[in-house]
């Protein structure tokens, strides 16, 4: 296990988060997929150990994984990250730039596949297939894993499979570090206040109205991390938009998938049954219940249809294995998140009544116990977090949509959230988008804000302390 004070992430380095003392923990064992036969596939931070684990399942797959891993890491460095860390190019221009280099063409070829088909074409062992499909689904792609044009997410997932980490002291510490840097530079945050609207005068955003009756005036700009439909239709008002854009936003494609969570307080850490029990239970990310790619595909279809999965599979973890500060001495915490539809039965998040939550939580703990039998007696307390809880706590995550919209190819890169708004600017002067409904989407990466900040700095004539590189220039250099 390694402590990382300054990982090379854009969010981390450009904001100087290491100056706040926040640290990441990188466990040696990264991902584990236990099977009903008692064997566990473990992905280690050491690539050779990972290849040996895959080789015990399928020697040919180990060789194929080694080759694909190297390709994925290279493409992440030369193409994927430059695209993510920059305002999106228009689709035609992006395709033109990609066609000019070998890596660009390779990225384009991988992207033409569906993620699920690419995984199945590359690898034969079902446990490995399941783990890779699970890793892609965690990025918000479950409802579209079978859609052509999503293959690039497999390269992202594989490249990051041995580089997972958690924040020492809990994810709150990352939020604390961000707030600390904001205050150190003269900013301030107003917590616990609901935004009632964005004031627009003479076609320009001039401030934010609060539900409490307060008003925050904007000197130069209003920047919204709420989804584009909420920002423009609900907060600013559709009367400031042309009819075509208003209709496009009203029909915005939400993700269709949400997370149902269970948090456990335990007397002891979960222990897997089987010959690889020690290795498996000691991994950071646990894939419980997805043993084949067909299991993932089953949930894909049910969630997309608005139906609860017929079997419970979890993204689980035991953070206290790596960070004892998150529980009293000798005790542990664990969690499990299940993919569920954002509109169960065609309804909305109100589906998650206390009774529905209790039923689902029981089924989720049953999955935990199936792979780690000691959880049944080790449980001290549980807390449920439903999509309705997410919506109440974070209204921008409507229906529990943590990614602020689908990752269908029609809603990615220069089409996210729609071509007219892809550059973070809106038709209202001084109003910008910076959230997960903008490129490159959600997860804890800060890139929507990072890219928007560069655009805003340019519009306002500010000299940023960071030095963003536009993907146009990065791809041109790759082709040189």
Image (tube, helix red, strand yellow):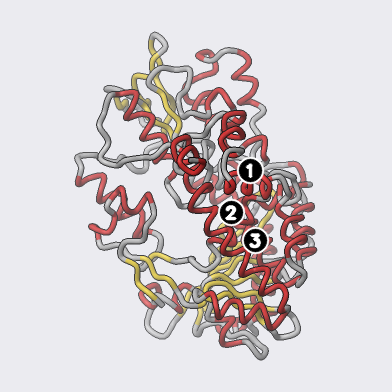
Q: Are marks 2 and 1 in contact (CB under 8 Å)?
A: yes
* Relative side of 218 to 397, left or right: left
How crowded is the residue under tag 1: few (<14 C-alpha within 10 Å), some, or many (20+)?
Answer: many
Q: Residue 252 location in percent, x, y?
A: 64, 31
Most foreground residue, 368 or 454 = 454
Cα gap from disc 3 to disc 1, whole angstroms: 19 Å
User: Sequence-wise, which precedes: disc 3 or disc 2?
Assistant: 2
Q: Is residue 382 visible?
A: no
The tag on residue 162 is none
User: Sequence-wise, which precedes: disc 3 or disc 1?
Assistant: 3
SS type, badge 1: loop
Q: Residue 86 location in percent, x, y?
A: 45, 38
Most foreground residue, 184 or 343 = 184
Q: Is residue 80 visible?
A: yes
* Relative side of 156 to 348, left or right: left
Q: Residue at x 37, y 43 (%)?
A: 192
Most foreground residue, 460 or 75 = 75
Location of residue 198 (image quadrant):
top left
Q: Residue at x 36, y 31 (%)?
A: 212
* Relative side of 361 to 480, left or right: right
Cα gap from disc 3 to disc 2, whole angstroms: 13 Å
Q: Residue 189 location in percent, x, y?
A: 29, 41
SS type, badge 2: helix
Given this view, does label 3 or label 2 mark the residue nearer the observer? 2
Badge 2 is on which residue?
139
Q: Residue at x 53, y 43 (%)?
A: 441
SS type, badge 3: strand
Badge 3 is on which residue?
338
Most foreground residue, 182 or 30 = 30
Q: Residue 128 location in percent, x, y?
A: 69, 70
Badge 1 is on which residue?
407
Residue located farthest toward the front when viewing the structure as drawn: 480
């Amino acid at each position: 296990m390694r402590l990382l004070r300054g990982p090379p992430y854009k969010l981390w380095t450009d904001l100087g988060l290491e100056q706040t003392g926040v640290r990441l923990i990188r466990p040696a064992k990264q991902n584990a997929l236990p099977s009903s036969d008692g064997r566990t596939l473990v992905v280690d931070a050491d690539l050779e150990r990972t290849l040996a684990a895959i080789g015990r399942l399928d020697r040919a797959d180990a060789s194929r994984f080694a080759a694909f891993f190297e390709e994925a890491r290279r493409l992440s460095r030369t193409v994927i990250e430059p695209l993510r860390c920059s305002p999106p190019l228009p689709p035609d221009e992006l395709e033109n730039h990609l066609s000019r280099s070998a890596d660009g063409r390779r990225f384009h070829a991988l992207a033409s596949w569906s993620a699920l088909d690419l995984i199945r074409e590359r690898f034969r062992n079902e446990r490995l297939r399941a783990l890779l499909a699970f890793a892609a689904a965690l990025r918000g792609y479950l409802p579209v894993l079978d859609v052509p044009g999503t293959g690039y997410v497999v390269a992202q997932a594989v490249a990051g499979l041995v580089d997972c980490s958690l924040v020492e002291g809990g994810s709150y510490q990352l939020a604390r570090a961000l707030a600390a840097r904001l205050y150190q530079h003269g900013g301030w945050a107003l917590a616990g206040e609901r935004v009632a609207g964005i004031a627009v005068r003479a076609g320009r955003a001039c401030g934010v109205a609060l539900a409490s009756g307060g008003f925050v005036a904007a000197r130069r700009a209003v920047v919204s991390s709420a989804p584009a439909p909420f920002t423009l239709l609900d907060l600013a008002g559709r009367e400031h938009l042309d009819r075509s854009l208003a209709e496009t936003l009203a029909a915005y494609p939400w993700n269709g998938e949400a997370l149902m969570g269970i948090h456990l307080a335990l007397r002891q850490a979960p222990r897997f049954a089987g010959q690889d029990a020690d290795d498996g239970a000691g991994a950071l990310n646990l894939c419980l219940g997805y043993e084949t790619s067909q299991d993932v595909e089953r949930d894909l279809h049910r969630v997309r249809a608005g139906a609860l999965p017929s079997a419970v599979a979890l993204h689980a973890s035991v953070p206290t294995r790596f960070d004892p500060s998150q529980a009293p001495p000798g005790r542990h915490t664990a969690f499990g998140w299940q993919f569920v539809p954002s509109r169960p039965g065609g309804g909305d998040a109100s589906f998650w009544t206390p009774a529905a939550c209790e039923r689902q939580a029981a089924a989720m703990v049953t999955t935990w116990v199936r792979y780690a039998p000691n959880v049944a007696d080790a449980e001290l307390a549980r807390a449920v977090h439903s999509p309705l809880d997410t919506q109440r706590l974070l209204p921008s995550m409507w229906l529990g949509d943590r990614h602020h919209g689908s990752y269908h190819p029609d809603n990615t890169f220069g089409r996210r959230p729609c071509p007219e708004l892809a550059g973070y600017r809106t038709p209202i002067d001084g109003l910008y988008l910076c959230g997960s409904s903008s490129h490159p989407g959600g997860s804890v990466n800060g890139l929507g804000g990072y890219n928007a900040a560069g655009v805003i700095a340019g519009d306002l004539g500010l000299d940023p302390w960071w030095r963003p590189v536009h993907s146009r220039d990065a791809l041109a250099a790759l082709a040189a």
